[in-house]
Image (tube, helix red, strand yellow):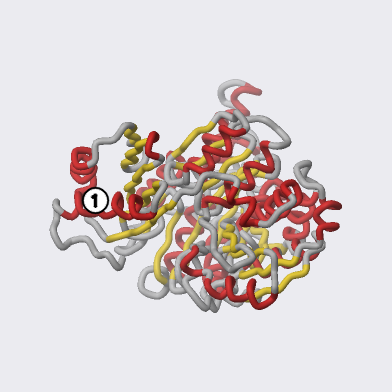
């Protein structure tokens, strides 16, 4: 029967996520995975049918038309050619259970599975093209706390499903009976143990990197992988680049010792490690390794937005072209782009939104201000390991310390807060905000973004796609001004429903 999404399940363009046990159960995850496999098979059948009609005219038949050879209804299964889906996960303690549920769901609809195990999400997505797969299913809740887990869905191009396709998939789950195959059509499973190695090779072959110069520099770095999947790749990358590495949280066991989001407030232990070991800089990644944060040699955590800014500078020194980021990213990225006379564009928050805008603009670099670097020369996916390599290259290029590299750019202060708020009241809330804070620039593409370019200030208010909260992000040349913008934004919304906003959300 069609699926009814349980209360508490976060459903968005980012996928499906929730807390394990009360919302996420093996039964639910098996059904979601089966639905994804059947959805991809149906898409493949539709594309094959179109191709057959073009080649042979109306009434064309054959394997691509969904007959028995394709595993169609007469073969006892869902319509569609046999396809392959990649399956990977981060290190969460619930990951193996949900991976097994996902594998069963995919096999039950006649989908072959390539299992990568615990790998960075960018590694999983890069492997899609290698296997010629129809898509990928990532078992990861990214930066969410340990009790959360999630599914992220990608297509054959190695990028996450965009909003339109995700809506079609959700409608498929709500409206359709998932067609299962018979015993003799069950999907096969095989392992891929080489995906991380291929990912490393691709990074090291990038034209933006002078690997010999990085190795000669002999960096001394500290690393925090927060017991996530990064421990399976980032130490190896750093050692290959000639670095001396001191690490914490390198065991990929999912026992997060802190809030796993790599924000400045969560990097105290990494700062201590930098100081105690005499490291030149520190790197921190999130559990699925698509976000990268930096700590300088004094142990001071730099804003996540600076990661993208410095990486963009490396690329733009070597090739000209547009830069794309999201509406919540620091103005410093725009400053870097303009210093190279590069066109600059903003997209709604969300990796796929940025990636699609990058495709449209033929961008040479982009990403999100949460430390997510997207380098099209590698793939259109946020990738912390490539960010690590580009940051080391930046320090080779400039010849100084990380603090000196950051000091080359204007200093902004960014404040990020979140609170519970009734989403059905957001439209009225945005109108109240516009009235309370008249702005020079107004962008409604993703929530509400108010900007005052002459003052270097902006405020972005939007519902989160990964948590049941509303996010407030403000930036200004002073911390006091950024805090004021967030406070005024929260105040404007709170007047609509006094006491409804939970500041501790």
Residue 391 location (% of width, % of height): 68, 53
Apparent side of residue 246 relative to residue 347 in the rendered image (left or right): right
Q: Is residue 123 visible?
A: no
Find disc 1 in the rendering and name its residue: 488
Which residue lies at the image location 60% right of the left edge and 77% below the top edge? Answer: 253
Q: Is residue 247 visible?
A: yes
Which residue lies at the image location 19% right of the left edge and 49% below the top edge? Answer: 492
Q: Is residue 102 above or below residue 68?
A: below
Apparent side of residue 14 relative to residue 269 in the rendered image (left or right): left
Q: Secondary structure at mark 1?
A: helix
Residue 102 location (% of width, % of height): 54, 64
Residue 134 location (% of width, % of height): 62, 46
User: The C terminus lies in which quarter of the figure?
Assistant: bottom left
| Number of residue marks | 1
Which residue lies at the image location 27% right of the left edge and 60% below the top edge? Answer: 420
Q: Nearer the viewer, residue 66 or 118?
A: 118
Residue 445 location (% of width, % of height): 36, 36
Q: Nearer the viewer, residue 386 or 403?
A: 403
Which residue lies at the image location 33% right of the left edge and 50% below the top edge? Answer: 481
Apparent side of residue 309 relative to residue 203 in the rendered image (left or right): left
Query: Dot 1 surroundings within 10 Å: few (below 14), some, or many (20 or more)?
Result: some
Q: Is residue 180 above or below residue 170?
A: below
């Amino acid at each position: 029967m069609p699926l009814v999404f349980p209360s508490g399940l976060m459903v968005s363009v980012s996928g499906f996520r929730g807390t394990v046990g009360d919302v996420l159960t093996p039964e639910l995850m098996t059904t979601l995975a089966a639905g994804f496999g059947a959805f991809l098979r149906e898409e493949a059948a539709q594309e094959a049918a179109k191709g057959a009609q073009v080649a042979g005219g109306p009434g064309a038949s054959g394997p691509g038309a969904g007959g028995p050879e394709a595993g169609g209804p007469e073969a006892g299964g869902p319509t569609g050619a046999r396809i392959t889906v990649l399956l990977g996960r981060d290190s969460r303690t619930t990951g193996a259970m949900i991976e097994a549920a996902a594998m069963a769901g995919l096999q039950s609809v006649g989908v072959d599975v390539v299992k990568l195990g615990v790998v960075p999400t960018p590694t999983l997505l890069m492997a899609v093209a290698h296997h010629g797969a129809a898509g990928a299913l990532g078992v990861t809740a990214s930066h969410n706390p340990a009790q959360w887990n999630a599914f992220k869905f990608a297509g054959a191009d190695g990028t996450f499903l965009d909003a339109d396709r995700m809506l079609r998939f959700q409608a498929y789950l709500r409206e359709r009976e998932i067609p299962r195959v018979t015993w003799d059509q069950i999907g096969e499973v095989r392992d891929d143990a080489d995906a991380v190695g291929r990912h490393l090779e691709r990074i090291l072959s990038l034209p933006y990197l002078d690997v010999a110069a990085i190795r000669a520099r002999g960096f001394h770095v500290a690393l925090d992988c927060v017991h996530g999947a990064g421990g399976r790749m980032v130490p190896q990358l750093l050692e290959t680049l000639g670095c001396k590495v001191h690490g914490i949280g390198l065991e990929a066991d999912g026992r997060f010792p802190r809030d796993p989001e790599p924000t400045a407030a969560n990097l105290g232990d990494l700062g201590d490690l930098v100081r105690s070991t005499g490291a030149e800089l520190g790197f921190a990644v999130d559990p699925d390794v698509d976000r990268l944060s930096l700590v300088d040699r004094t142990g001071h955590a730099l804003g996540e937005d600076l990661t993208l800014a410095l990486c963009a500078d490396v690329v733009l020194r070597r090739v000209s072209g547009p830069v794309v980021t999201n509406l919540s990213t620091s103005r410093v990225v725009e400053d870097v782009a303009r210093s190279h006379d590069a066109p600059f564009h903003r997209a709604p928050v969300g990796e796929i939104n940025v990636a699609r805008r990058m495709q449209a603009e033929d961008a040479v670099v982009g990403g999100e201000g949460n430390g997510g670097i997207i380098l099209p020369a590698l793939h259109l996916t946020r990738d912390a390991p490539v960010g690590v390599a580009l940051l080391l290259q930046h320090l080779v290029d400039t010849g100084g310390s990380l603090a000196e590299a950051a000091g080359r750019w204007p200093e902004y202060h960014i404040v990020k807060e979140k609170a519970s708020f009734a989403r059905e009241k957001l439209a009225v809330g945005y109108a109240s905000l516009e009235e309370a804070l008249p702005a020079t620039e107004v962008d409604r593409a993703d929530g509400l973004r108010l900007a005052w370019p002459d003052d270097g200030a902006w405020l972005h208010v939007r519902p989160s796609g990964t948590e049941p909260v509303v996010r407030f992000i403000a930036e200004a040349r002073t911390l006091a001004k950024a805090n004021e913008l967030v406070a005024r934004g929260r105040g404007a919304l709170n007047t609509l429903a006094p006491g409804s906003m939970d500041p501790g959300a």
